[in-house]
Image (cartoon, rainbow, N blue to C red):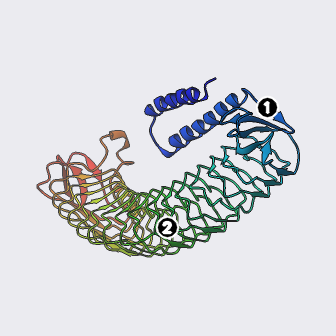
Amino acid sequence: MNYRKYVSGCCGLLVTCAIGMSFNQNALSSIDQIYQETVVQAAEQESGNNTLEWGDYEYKIENGTEDESVATVMLTKYSGSDKEIIVPEEINGMKVTHIGGSVFKNNINIETVILPNGMQKIDSFAFSGCKSLKSIELPDSVEQIGSSAFSSCESLTTITIPANLTTICTQTFLFSGLESISIPETVKKIQTSAFDSCQSLEVVELHEGLEIIEQGAFSDCKKLESIVIPDSVEKIGYYAFNGDAALCSVKLPDHLSIIQIGTFENCKSLESIDLPDSVTEIQSGAFANCSSLKTFVFPDAVKYIGGTMFQGDTSLVSVQIPSGVNKVGYFAFQNCSSLETIELPEQVTKIEHGAFWGCSSLKEIEIPNGVTEIESDTFKNCSMLTQMVIPDHVTKIGNEAFLGCSSIKSIKMPKELTDIGNKAFANCVSLQKIDIPAKVEKLTSDCQNMMEYYNAFLDCMSMTDINVDVDNPSFASVDGILYDKSVQKMILCPR
């Protein structure tokens, strides 16, 4: 079989499949995994042609024939059971420079490996699943280590990265037992999930020269406490440090412009972080579920607070938002249960749904005048809010926007309001009265059989008066009771 044609054909098929699916992280990871396995399988199939034997090894001649001085050897299979592997420097006078894909994969006997000087390439999955492997000597001649080469090497606690390596490939050390790692200055890129789930990893040294840290590179490294990212790094991928539960100290590069999706999500020991002034964008979930995060200062250039950015940050008490911010994303502060006050700049024109849902300590907040809609769930279960002034230009209050705001006693409704959503003020048990403006056309669901369930003021136990503007074309009130305009159908009778 022609190896290159086989891989090329499979890649074409993968691209065709990819066009038909959404490019989310899971989809891309699946495509990447399929591609890696396809390459390895193809290499294994081709290596079966012209395979030779030498002791416990099978091998293939590269770069010529056995009689040519330039010929080198790629190992394609190992069938031995030794605990110590000393890979030969030569076989039949030809230098061994290449360990093929999966050669030692899942060999549970191997404890130590010594590679010869002159070894240049270690292919994908070469030592994957060698659960007893404790040490391996990689000479500086190694220029390439393939994806997942040392994945699931649970006993491998330390390794020296060769000085000539420029890339740490995808999932190279996934699920390995590494406790510390130093990345030499020759390495320019750390690829996707390279050190993902190295749950014993405590020390990571990165050096100037590194340019890219890709998505999930150090995610779920549960014991990693600190990281200093050199100024040469231009990009940190999404979820790069997600789930690093012990991470409490982070130094970011001075010229970083974007904090990507979920970069520090679930870093439960992170109490504070200094962002460089160069940061212009912080994407959704970047600091979600950082349950120890207490304070946060946005760089001045940021214009948008991303969705779920601080979701679940239960210790957050102080946030400084720059004057240029114009939008607060969906669920941005959901369940920030220690947040008592927050000042939104006047430039804010949109607060997306669920932005402050579950901020149970929030006592006051001033909604900027440019906001025209209070979206669904925005202040849901903000149980300490005592009053609310809604800006004059707001025309719609979404479903359950203030549901469960049990301390709120008064709300000033804007004159331009036309729509009050389903259960918008339900369970506001301290709310005593409400004035419905002239332009309000919708208060409840159109479903007559579920009128009570969808009532905008359901279970407002303290309410005594509902007053409707006399110019309202849809509703009326008599003695504090809410009726339709004809006063033939009672909609709500306060207690």
Camera-near label (1 vs 2) is 1
Query: In the shown orientation, is residue 52 left or right of residue 12?
Result: right
Residue at x 48%, y 55% (from the top left corner):
238
Q: Position of residue 302 (x, y in %)?
A: 32, 66
Locate residue 380: give its quadrant.
bottom left
Taking depth in this image into account, of 341 and 11 the one nearest to the observer is 11
Which residue is depicted at the point 26% across and 64% down? 348
Q: Is residue 107 above or below residue 324?
A: above
**Amino acid at the residue labelled 2:** Asp
| Residue 346 picture location, percent across and down | 23, 69
Vertical side of 169 occupied by 264: above or below? below
SS at mark 1?
strand
Q: Tag 2's secondary structure?
A: loop
CA–CA distance in space, label 1 to label 2:
60 Å
> Picture quarter containing residue 256?
bottom left
Amino acid type of the residue that numbered disc 1 sits on in the rendered structure? Leu
Q: Is residue 151 above or below residue 320?
A: above
> Which residue position is annotated with label 2?
313
The residue labelled by disc 1 is 52
The circle on residue 368 is none
Instruction: Please give the name of the residue rendered at 43% of the width and 67% of the height, measured from the top-left corner.
Output: 359
Of 369 and 208, the residue lying toward us: 208
User: In which quadrant is the N terminus drawn?
Assistant: top right
